[in-house]
Image: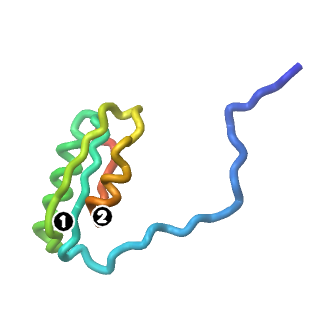
Amino acid sequence: MDVLTPVRSMSNQWKPLARRPSSLRGCRIGVLDNSKPNADVLLGRLAELLVERHGAASIVRWRKPGSSRPAAMIDEVARGADVVLTGSGD
């Protein structure tokens, strides 16, 4: 009998967090909308507040074709923004 588990083995290695800017002043804020309901509204408003309250320079937006689809434009997002907001707005 073969027993299969859907759980993959976990590595014990910790990965460092991505570098964070010391300030958002002048940063390009990227918004990666995953196409779920209200994600664009939530993330867009948060990006606007970062511009208004923290001096971020601009907002650049990308939209995935669906929440379960990969972000094929991820390299473009990485090149086009200094800080990226993404998440679900359900």
Query: Residue at the location (33% across, 31% down)?
Result: 66
Q: Nearer the viewer, mark 1 or mark 2?
A: 2
Measured from the top left, where is residue 32 in percent x and y?
A: 29, 48
Res 83 label = 2
- CA separation, marks 1 and 2? 11 Å
Q: How many marks?
A: 2
Furthest residue in direction bottom, as rendered:
22
Colour option used: rainbow
Measured from the top left, where is residue 79 in percent x and y?
A: 31, 60
From this view, report whether residue 2 is shown above or below residue 17: above
CB under 8 Å between discs 1 and 2: yes
Residue type of the residue flagged with mark 1: Leu
SS for callout 2: strand
From this view, report whether residue 44 is shown above or below residue 89: below
Question: Which residue is the site of mark 1?
Answer: 50
Query: Residue at the location (40% across, 33% down)?
Result: 69
Q: Where does the N terminus fall, quadrant-wise?
A: top right
Describe residue 30's horizontal placement relative to residue 55 as left or right: right
**Dot 2 alpha-carbon crowd within 10 angstroms: few under 14, some 14 to 19, many 20 or more:** some
**Dot 1 alpha-carbon crowd within 10 angstroms: few under 14, some 14 to 19, many 20 or more:** some
Query: Residue at the location (24% across, 33% down)?
Result: 37
Describe residue 4's horizontal placement relative to residue 88 as left or right: right
Q: Where does the C terminus fall, quadrant-wise?
A: top left
Measured from the top left, where is residue 22 in percent x and y?
A: 32, 80
Furthest residue in direction left, as rendered:
52
Residue type of the residue flagged with mark 2: Val
